[in-house]
Every structure is written in structure tokens, then in C-alpha cells.
Image (tube, rainbow, N blue to C red):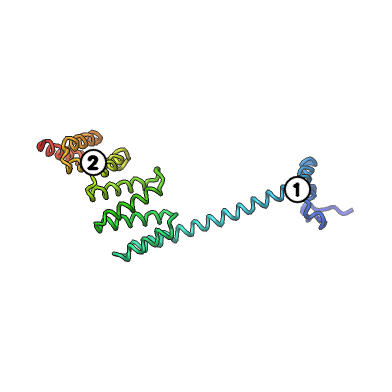
């Protein structure tokens, strides 16, 4: 009787090709495992089918998201190269078409800046507020937008509202200077010199180094001296 090579392809009858348990028997797997597979073969096929569909859909979705990201970045870059109303219209198209992407959000920030630069403070404020409503609190963009809201309020001489926004920025790393000096400036414009002095003194306490080492500290010190002379 001829011996079979270990590398010889096993013959499987047509009726057994759909029998997963039969295939496993050919692999000399434990009988109990083969019996379990035979018993739950339909369920196993169903699970494998579902997993296959999920993997394919996830891969296609990932490809779609990446394509959208590249398209939105390119559209934003092109819009930023334009000037005037053409720039505004292009930014609005990016914000609308790619609303769910980072580029779409940034386009809306650029729109708000456009309105600020053109002294349309009401439109700028509404743009910033709309962005903030749709951005998570832990998103770094939220801090930048809060600064924009503060600037818009201040430009419209809504000083109390501006002071509230600057107050938020005082507790955010990287925005402390904007927060303290913004609040102090508001109080100074309102003639509340004692509160302006208090803001500058608090800010001074957060600055490291000496007057000679830290130019910001020197500037605040001079500002304090000038304000106290007016009191």
C-alpha cells in the first residue's frame, strides 16, 4: 500500500466541503471539539459572516474619513489664500461642506476673525458662540473661541460680558496673561481702578523671576505704578 506524503493535498468529498466539522476531523482535532463545531456550525458561520462584514465596513469607513480629512484640509488651505468677500464665501463653503471635520471648525473660526477684522463685531460674536456650542469643553479650540468671544464683547463695549469671559481664561494654562490683562483693561476702561490694580497684582504674583529677568513682570509693575498714581 502506497504511503501518503505529509504534504499531499487531502481529498474532500463535495458533500463534506460545507461541513466544518469534517474539515476539522481531517486536522486530527479532539473529537469533543469537532462535535461542538458540528452542533453549532450554523451559528459559527453566522458569527464569521457578521465579523467579516464589520471588518469590511470599518475599513471602508476609515478610508472615507481619511479621504474627507484630506479633502477638507486642501479646501481650507485654498480658501485661506483668497482675499475679501471671495475668502469669506470660500470659508463658508468649507464650513458647510466639511462641518464634521477639524478643517470645518477652523473655517468657522476664520470666518469669525474675518468679521472682527472688518469691525462686524455682532457677526463675529455670533460666529464664536455658535462654534462654542458645538465644541466639547475639553477641546483646546474652546479656549481660543472663548478669547474670541471676550474680544467681540469688549469691541462692542459690553464690558461686563467681556470681563466674565476673561475671568474664564485666567484659569487656563497658556491663557493666564490674556485673562488677567484683559480683565484689568476692562476695569480700567470702566474707571474701576481698584479692581484693575487687584487684577494686575494677582497676575504679578503668578509671574516667575525678577523684574530684570522677566520683561512681562516689569511691564505689569510699571502699569501698577501708573494706576496707583491715578487713585
Percent across and percent down for residue 126 are 32, 52
**Count of labels shown?**
2
What SS does tag 1 mark?
helix
Residue bearing the label numbered 1: 41
| Pointer 1 with pointer 2, Cβ within 8 A | no
Q: Residue at x 26, y 48 (%)?
A: 153
Task: Name the N-terminal-most of marks 1 and 2.
Answer: 1
Percent across and percent down for residue 192 are 17, 38
- In terms of image quadrants, where is residue 96? bottom left
Q: Nearer the viewer, residue 49 or 159?
A: 159
Q: Residue at x 12, y 39 (%)?
A: 226
Q: Residue at x 30, y 51 (%)?
A: 125
Percent across and percent down for residue 187 are 19, 40
Q: Nearer the viewer, residue 160 or 20?
A: 160
Q: CA distance from mark 1 to mark 2?
A: 71 Å
Residue bearing the label numbered 2: 183
- Vertical side of 184 occupied by 73: above or below: below
Q: Nearer the viewer, residue 156 or 178?
A: 156
Tag in front: 1 or 2:
2
The quadrant of the picture occupied by the C terminus is: top left
The residue carrying pointer 1 sits among few (fewer than 14), some (14 to 19) or many (20 or more) residues within 10 Å by Cα, namely some
Amino acid at each position: 500500500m502506497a504511503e501518503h506524503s505529509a504534504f499531499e493535498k487531502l481529498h474532500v468529498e463535495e458533500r463534506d466541503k460545507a461541513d466544518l466539522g469534517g474539515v476539522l476531523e481531517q486536522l486530527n482535532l479532539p473529537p469533543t471539539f469537532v462535535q461542538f463545531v458540528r452542533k453549532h456550525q450554523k451559528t459559527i458561520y453566522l458569527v464569521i459572516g457578521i465579523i467579516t462584514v464589520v471588518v469590511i465596513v470599518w475599513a471602508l469607513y476609515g478610508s472615507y474619513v481619511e479621504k474627507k480629512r484630506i479633502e477638507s484640509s486642501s479646501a481650507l488651505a485654498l480658501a485661506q489664500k483668497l482675499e475679501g468677500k471671495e475668502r469669506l464665501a470660500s470659508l463658508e463653503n468649507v464650513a458647510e461642506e466639511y462641518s464634521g471635520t477639524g478643517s470645518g471648525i477652523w473655517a468657522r473660526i476664520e470666518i469669525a476673525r474675518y468679521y472682527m477684522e472688518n469691525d462686524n463685531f455682532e457677526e463675529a460674536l455670533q460666529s464664536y458662540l455658535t462654534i462654542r456650542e458645538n465644541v466639547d469643553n475639553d477641546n483646546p479650540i474652546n479656549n481660543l473661541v472663548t478669547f474670541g468671544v471676550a474680544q467681540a464683547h469688549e469691541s462692542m463695549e459690553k464690558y461686563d460680558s467681556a470681563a466674565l469671559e476673561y475671568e474664564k481664561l485666567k484659569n487656563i494654562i497658556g491663557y493666564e496673561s490674556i485673562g488677567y490683562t484683559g480683565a484689568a483693561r476692562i476695569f480700567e476702561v470702566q474707571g474701576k481702578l481698584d479692581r484693575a490694580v487687584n487684577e494686575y497684582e494677582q497676575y504679578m504674583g503668578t509671574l516667575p523671576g525678577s523684574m530684570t529677568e522677566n520683561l512681562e513682570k516689569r511691564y505689569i509693575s510699571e502699569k501698577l505704578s501708573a494706576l496707583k498714581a491715578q487713585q
